[in-house]
Amino acid sequence: MVRIEVAYEGRLRCRATHAPSKNTLLTDAPVDNHGKGESFSPTDLVATALGTCMVTIMGIAATKHGLDLAGTRVSVLKEMTSEPPRRIGRLTVRIDLNRTYEPKQLTLLKNAALTCPVHHSLHPDIEIPVEFHQGP
């Protein structure tokens, strides 16, 4: 179990504290939803969680098989729905691998990414296309 403490600071800004480490982050409402957009929005954190989770699970699998993913990059494009209720409609994930992998290794990494807990926790109505690109 991990506790996250959230304090509302006013003007649509929150400060979240990760209780075990005491690290903090700020969120702001996005500009298109009455906010300043000066930090991650709560839905931006969902996209962030997806990208970091996918590459972390890939990293675990890679380490088990003697592979090094250092330099791999992940980009997540978050799109909100235009009709109410306001929600995430699509998270397009692009994973740029640090090198070209053998077919078996690539399959291992792809399967790992798609088993990340965040991916499995998101509502099935959210479209989540995932692209893998190999090479430096």
Image: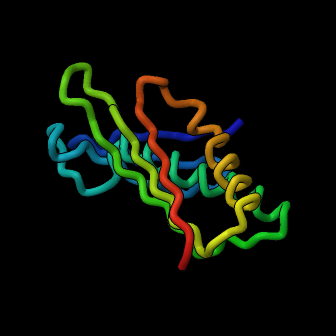
x and y, in percent, of residue 91 in the image: 40, 42
Q: Classify residue 28 as left or right of residue 74.
A: left
Q: Residue furthest bottom?
A: 136
State the residue in front, 129 or 38. 129
- Residue 113 versus residue 121: which sits nearer the camera? 113
Q: Residue at x 34, y 52 (%)?
A: 40
- Looking at the image, is 4 positioned above or below residue 26? above
Question: Which quadrant, please, contains the C terminus?
Answer: bottom right
On the rendered image, what quadrant is the N terminus found in? top right
- The residue drawn where x is 43% and y is 46% is 47
From the viewer's perspective, tell me whether residue 20 is left or right of residue 82: right
Which image quadrant for residue 116? top right
Look at the picture and state if 12 lies above or below 95. Answer: above
Residue 18, given in percent of the width and then of the height, sits at 57, 49
Point 25% across, 57% down: residue: 38
Q: How far across and down, in percent of the image, does residue 61 sit?
A: 77, 56
Colouring of the image: rainbow
Horizontal arrangement in the rendering, residue 23 relative to residue 104 (left or right): left
In the picture as drawn, the residue positioned furthest to the top comes out as 85
Is residue 66 found left or right of 119 in the rendered image? right
Q: At which x and y percent is residue 11?
A: 21, 43
